[in-house]
Image (cartoon, rainbow, N blue to C red):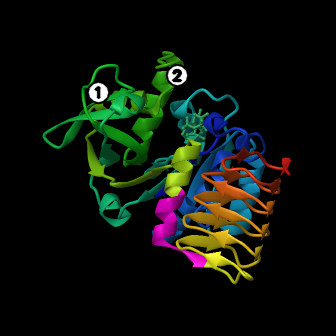
């Protein structure tokens, strides 16, 4: 069994942060998005993984090697951002005919994988959503997937694909991806994994679905902050902070310096941060940032950014310096 994790994308919707930091290394809860995924894999004893890198891939390689040495990680570069199907195709040489578990790198999920991985046939994670037009959707019949459609223009199913795919027959997936690329089958300008899975179904592969209620997107500032709220509710910790009122749930890293402040609720202060004389709620302060005399709400502050003065809402990129006096 091998986990295959595409993390090559630009993360356009999370600019300016993603100019200098890959989306999957942005903090949510107590660690980077990718850290939550890899931690789950370690818990499930899935220790072989392929990561498909692209934009700022070196940072991802360093992070994984340093923080998850127990994972036997292979890195493959997707040279052009041609879509998820193309990303998986780029990784095909690393997975032979072993079973694979594809996980989108920007999604935190809370699902019991034991049951999923016991499945006798391929199975893809789904969740019922009100507006499925932004997602790939599955149409099922007698418990099996009959059709998969990427971003449907008419409401054919509310069963959205959440970005978890357990594939038993990886040889057939490879062949289907190859066909996709050979015949240049693109949807919305990209080679879609959904379309390759549809080819698999047409070639006779049986695919079921599994319900994923705990699906937390991190692709946009609002969803990153709401995922942060969810994770802090589940797991919170505040290191000692001098002369500070902490309103749980929060995460304050052990070596962060926090003084004369009000922190929380739903706030993450990452390692190496300095926070003084500030009021911060519902916000994520990435590693090494320095916040002084500030009032922040619903804000994301990039690594090593410096923020001084008073304001209410901010989306400040890495290494930016802002003073409001
Ligand atoms: P998204 O399309 O949500 O991510 O792909 P993105 O491209 O990084 O973000 P936006 O849309 O520009 O804001 C979901 C996951 O699939 C990966 C992304 O890195 C992300 O983890 N992906 C997507 C690839 O690895 N390669 C691709 O060609 C497309």
Q: Identify the residue under disc 2.
A: 181
10 Å crowding of disc 1: few (<14), some (14-19), many (20+): few
Q: 314 or 1, which is in the foreground?
A: 314
Q: Where is residue 316 in the image (x, y as percent from the top left)?
A: 75, 46
- Extreme-left residue of the structure: 142
Left or right placement of residue 199 versus residue 295 in this view: left
Q: Position of residue 188 (x, y in %)?
A: 49, 19
Q: Position of residue 320 (x, y in %)?
A: 84, 47
Left or right placement of residue 290 versus residue 211 in this view: right
Q: Where is residue 229 in the image (x, y as percent from the top left)?
A: 50, 60
Q: Main secondary structure of the magenta part?
A: helix
Q: Residue at image x 40%, y 36%?
A: 172
Left or right placement of residue 300 versus residue 114 in this view: right
Residue 152's place in the image compared with 321, above or below, is above
Q: Identify the residue under disc 1.
A: 202
Can residue 74 be seen?
Answer: no
């Amino acid at each position: 069994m091998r986990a295959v994790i595409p993390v090559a994308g630009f993360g356009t919707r999370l600019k300016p942060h993603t100019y200098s930091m890959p989306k999957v290394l942005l903090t949510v809860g107590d660690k980077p998005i990718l850290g939550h995924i890899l931690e789950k894999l370690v818990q499930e004893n899935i220790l072989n993984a392929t990561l498909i890198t692209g934009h700022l891939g070196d940072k991802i390689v360093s992070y994984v090697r340093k923080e998850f040495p127990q994972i036997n990680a292979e890195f493959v570069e997707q040279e052009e951002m041609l879509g998820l199907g193309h990303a998986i195709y780029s990784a095909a040489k690393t997975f032979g005919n072993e079973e694979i578990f594809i996980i989108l790198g920007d999604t935190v999920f809370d699902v019991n994988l034991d049951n999923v991985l016991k499945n006798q046939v391929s199975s893809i994670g789904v969740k019922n959503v009100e507006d499925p037009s932004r997602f790939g959707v599955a149409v099922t019949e007698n418990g099996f997937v009959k059709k998969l459609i990427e971003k449907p223009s008419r409401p054919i199913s509310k069963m959205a694909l959440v970005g978890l795919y357990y594939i038993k027959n990886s040889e057939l997936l490879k062949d289907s991806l190859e066909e996709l690329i050979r015949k240049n089958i693109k949807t919305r300008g990209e080679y879609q994994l959904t379309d390759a899975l549809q080819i698999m179904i047409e070639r006779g592969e049986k695919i079921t679905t599994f319900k994923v209620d705990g699906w937390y997107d991190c692709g946009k500032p609002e969803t990153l902050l709401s995922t942060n709220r969810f994770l802090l509710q589940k797991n919170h910790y505040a290191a000692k902070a001098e002369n500070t009122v902490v309103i749980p749930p929060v995460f304050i890293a052990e070596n962060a310096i926090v003084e004369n402040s009000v922190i929380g609720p739903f706030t993450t202060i990452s390692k190496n941060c300095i926070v003084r004389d500030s009021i911060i709620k519902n916000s994520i302060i990435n590693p090494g940032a320095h916040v002084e005399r500030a009032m922040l709400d619903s804000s994301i502050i990039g690594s090593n950014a410096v923020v001084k003065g008073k304001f209410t809402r901010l989306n400040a990129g890495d290494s930016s310096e802002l003073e409001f006096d």
